Amino acid sequence: MANDKVDPNVQDYSNKYGEETAAELTSTVYPVSSQEAYERINEFRGNSRVYGIASLAFAILSFFFYPYIAALIGIVLGFVAQRKGQIALGAWAIGICALSIILSLLVVPVPL
């Protein structure tokens, strides 16, 4: 008799688990002031700027001395700089190093 009042178009969820699992699947967010976040970002970027400048220095050095070795070091440091947040500086260094290697292969033949 009790089932006579149940609408057949409404799905019965009484036998299913209805817990919300979103809280367990997401990371915990801690409140941070905007000034503290700004200081953390600047500290992180300040350390990575050294890698970007060093990669750019090796890129320019690779045009004049030891093009293959200096360019490879510059490319590696460029990727490290990009990973640490200096995306543009690292990309420029990688591009200049690649150009240096290509020009070195065209201008200076590799001894066999």
Image: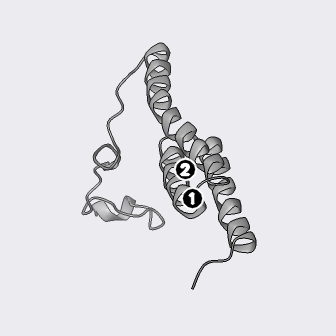
Q: Residue at x 51, y 44 (%)?
A: 81
Judge whether residue 85 can be spotted in this image: no
Residue type at mark 1 is Tyr
Residue 45 in picture, x, y percent from top left: 50, 31
Say which residue appears at 50% left-offset and 20% top-offset. 38
Label 2 CA crowd tier, 10 Å (few <14, some 14–19, many 20+): many
**In the rendered image, which residue does mark 2 sit on?**
78
Instruction: Look at 35% across and 62% down and name the residue there.
Output: 12
- What is the quadrant of residue 66 in the picture? bottom right
Foreground label between 1 and 2: 1
Q: Nearer the viewer, residue 26 or 57?
A: 57
| Quarter occupied by the N terminus | bottom left
Q: Position of residue 64 (x, y in %)?
A: 66, 52
Using the rendered view, name the quadrant where residue 88 is placed. Answer: top right
In this orientation, which residue lies closer to the viewer: 17 or 72?
Answer: 72
Sequence order check, earlier mark of 1 and 2: 1
What distance separates the C-alpha of mark 1 from that of mark 2? 18 Å
Q: For this rendering, which residue is in front, 21 or 64? A: 64
Q: Which residue position holds label 1?
A: 66
